[in-house]
Image: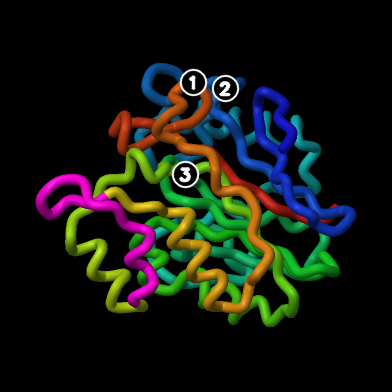
């Protein structure tokens, strides 16, 4: 994994020409709780700062086009990126070079998908609600691509993600094997391993080659925004595109 101080490059065997990054919180214009490279317009930050941050993002990464920003709703809808700008969806995919798929997170898990030829790419916003709802399966079905690889970006880690019994039961209703991703904490409380839950789902959907998943947003306030840690906070972006 390579890091510029402003973003993390995905460490996975993507085909030549495919770029995949997660931004860090440094290097932007936002102030206070949103300092400094907040890329989300929906969290209460000054829109002028967010617009400036998005402009800096495109310039620094030499993006071929503006990212396709979604209106994320913790659901299971995946849309074709070039037709889905501001769509109520939690994943986008594309087969076109120069189209930038993007998701915003601050504890939820960003998942990037790519086929071995680099002809089909996707970005997925996967909080626990989206994972239960089937956002990963819906995205893979929409992509209609063979031999996928996946990269899991920074998310809240298994030492920090406390959930109730209702969340655990929601996953167990999907499959008993999800029990291995929960560790008992207190009466009725569990520590959930969000990347492990995603790996289970990806494996069940036929994706065997899965990378990343080791960076905790909650534990690194100087690098990542975290909603669980801070409440009012910004969002990082995870992006994938083909040159």
Q: Along the line of sight, which residue is nearer the eye, 111 or 204?
A: 204
> In the rendered image, which residue does mark 1 sit on?
222
- How far separated are the C-alphas under marks 3 and 1? 14 Å
Looking at the image, which residue is at 55% across and 60% down? 124
Looking at the image, which residue is at 23% across and 52% down? 184
Residue 163 screen position, x and y as percent: 24, 51
| In the image, residue 177 lies in the stretch drawn in magenta | yes
| Pointer 3 local density, CA inside 10 Å: few below 14, some 14–19, many at least 20 | many
Looking at the image, which residue is at 43% across and 74% down? 134
Q: Taking 195 as reference, is 201 above or below it?
A: below
Residue 82 visible: no
Magenta region, residue range: 176-190
Q: Along the line of sight, which residue is nearer the eye, 144 or 151?
A: 151
Residue 109 visible: yes
Side (left or right) of 233 relative to 25: left
Q: Taking 5 as reference, is 192 above or below it?
A: below
| In the image, residue 40 lies in the stretch drawn in magenta | no
Side (left or right) of 159 relative to 170: right
**Residue 142: which quarter of the image?**
bottom right
Residues at badges 2 and 1 in contact (C-beta under 8 Å)?
A: yes
| Pointer 1 local density, CA inside 10 Å: few below 14, some 14–19, many at least 20 | few
- How far separated are the C-alphas under marks 3 and 2? 17 Å
Looking at the image, which residue is at 31% across and 38% down? 228
Picture quarter with the N terminus: top right
> In the rendered image, which residue does mark 2 sit on?
26
Q: Along the line of sight, which residue is nearer the eye, 96 or 181?
A: 181
Query: At numbered mark 3, what does the secondary structure look like: helix, strand or loop?
Result: loop
């Amino acid at each position: 994994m390579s890091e510029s101080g402003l973003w993390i490059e995905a460490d996975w065997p993507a085909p030549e020409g495919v770029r995949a990054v997660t931004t860090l919180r440094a290097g932007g214009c936002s102030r206070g709780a949103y300092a400094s490279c907040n890329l989300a317009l929906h969290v209460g930050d000054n829109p002028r700062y967010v617009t400036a941050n998005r402009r800096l993002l495109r310039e620094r990464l030499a993006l071929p086009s503006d990212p396709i920003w979604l209106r994320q709703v913790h659901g299971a809808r995946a849309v074709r990126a070039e037709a889905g700008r501001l769509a109520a969806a939690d994943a986008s995919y594309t087969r076109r070079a120069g189209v930038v798929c993007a998701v915003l997170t601050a504890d939820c898990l960003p998942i990037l998908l790519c086929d071995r030829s680099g002809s089909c790419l996707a970005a997925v916003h996967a909080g626990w609600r989206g994972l239960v709802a089937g956002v990963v399966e819906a995205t893979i079905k929409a992509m209609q691509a063979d031999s996928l690889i996946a990269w899991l970006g920074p998310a809240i880690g298994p030492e920090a993600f406390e959930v109730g019994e209702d969340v655990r039961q929601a996953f167990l209703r999907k499959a008993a094997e999800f029990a291995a991703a929960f560790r008992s904490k207190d009466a009725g409380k569990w520590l959930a391993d969000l990347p492990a839950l995603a790996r289970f789902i990806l494996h069940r959907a036929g994706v065997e080659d899965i990378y990343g998943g080791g960076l905790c947003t909650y534990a690194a306030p100087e690098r990542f925004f975290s909603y669980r840690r801070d409440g009012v906070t910004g969002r990082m972006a995870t992006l994938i595109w083909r040159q």
